Amino acid sequence: MKNKTPITTATDDTAGKNRDETRQRFTRIARCPSCRKGKLLWNSRVVRCVTCSAWYPITDGVLQLVPLTSAYTEDRNSFREKVGKRYRLKVDRKTVSPESPQEVQRRHFDRYATDIDQSYNIYETMVFWRVIDRSIFDGWMKIIPKNAVILDVGCAQGRSAKPFVENKYTVIGFDIAKKMIEAGNSRFKDLAKPPLLFVGDATTIPVADGCADVVVLYGVLHHLPHPRLIAKEIARVLKPKGIFLSLENNRTPLRFLFDVLQRLMCLWDEKAGESPTMSAADVSGWFAEADMTVRTRTHVFLPPHLINILPVPVGYRITAWTDAAASRIPLIREWGGLIEIIGTKTNQIK
């Protein structure tokens, strides 16, 4: 990555100070995901909304800042049984639908966090994704302001946070799957400036309007319900002229070749949402309705299965060369397997 410095550990005092600074930044901008506006009252065990009195547990060191409709019901019930009287926690009146989009994704990624056949850590270290991650993040580092606060939506176990942490950005990330967050906290626990990670729901991002310099959804949008509403939620939390960054599955005439190869030799287990692929026109339409401007570019004109058998340096050079060549050919340049999205918030908060 450009300007990357080695991730280093720190003394307990320095690490503690950095964690406290990030935590203080988050507590200033955090908002209740249930009523969408209330500020939060914090202590070491539970977080409360000062407006609607909704409460959010901190279990195993992980804050679960999600509304009841996408909460871990068993965790909440167990937590309330242990400390409910002490904190005067009200009984939940809503339950999570087992077939809700959030619950389907949660089950998938909780399993994927530690799956013995292929965990998300193994997925991240594939040659193909190492090549793509390097290419995409190198480009993004050139456009992100130096002192930006980055909101990493769908951060998984820290895969997308890692490049920003390496470049000393302040990162606040969340994911719908608690086991992913636990893995991320373990991954960054010894760093001088770790990201702040918690359980959250991208459909109700629990932060104030206009507070984020940069919002990142790295391979996340195609997992989520109602992309138009997600686009409006992203625009809501961005500062005026804030930046949105994403990489998603492109809808291309060549997609069927990838699907055939996946059936013959499956590289990874996918659980997409209602928009498993998307076109530049889709993306432009969704974000235009949210008063954001976006530009798109497609990447990867070779099968991932081919890139995956190459050494990383060779795969990186070949992918860069084929991307550059295809980008000069009308029509073909829109057929890459992945679509990169770079958006900008308008100069107003609505």
Image: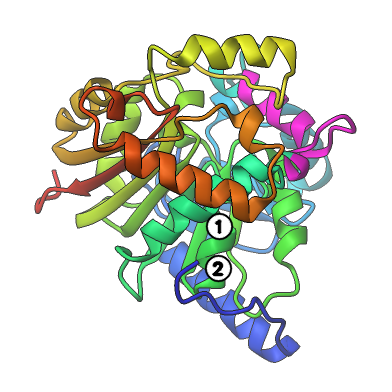
Position of residue 57 measured from the top left corner of the image (x, y, whole percent): 67, 47
Q: Is residue 310 above or below residue 165?
A: above
Viewer-closest of 37 and 18: 18
Image point 47% across, 17% down: which residue? 276
Image point 60% across, 36% down: which residue? 176
Viewer-closest of 1 and 59: 1
Position of residue 83 measured from the top left corner of the image (x, y, whole percent): 78, 48
Q: Secondary structure at mark 1?
A: helix
Image point 44% across, 48% down: which residue? 320
Q: Quadrant of residue 233?
A: top left
Amino acid type of the residue tagged 2 in the rendering: Val
Report the magenta residues as a range: 104-122
Q: Quadrant of residue 98?
A: top right
Q: Tell whether label 2 touches label 1 (CB within 8 Å).
A: yes
Q: Residues within 10 Å of mark 1 (few under 14, many from 20)?
A: many
User: Of all residues shown, which one is farthest toward the right?
Assistant: 116
Q: Is residue 116 left or right of residue 292?
A: right
Residue 113 covered by magenta stretch: yes
Viewer-closest of 31 and 312: 312
Colour scheme: rainbow
Q: Residues within 10 Å of mark 2 (few under 14, many from 20)?
A: many
Position of residue 173 measured from the top left corner of the image (x, y, whole percent): 53, 53
Residue 112 covered by magenta stretch: yes
Residue 178's tag is none
Q: Is residue 91 above or below residue 46?
A: above
Residue 161's tag is 1
Q: What is the spatial separation of the Cα atoms under label 1 and label 2, in whole angstroms?
A: 6 Å
Q: Secondary structure at mark 2?
A: helix
Amino acid type of the residue tagged 1 in the rendering: Ala
Q: Main secondary structure of the magenta part?
A: helix
Position of residue 297 measured from the top left corner of the image (x, y, whole percent): 30, 38
Question: Label 2: which residue?
Answer: 165
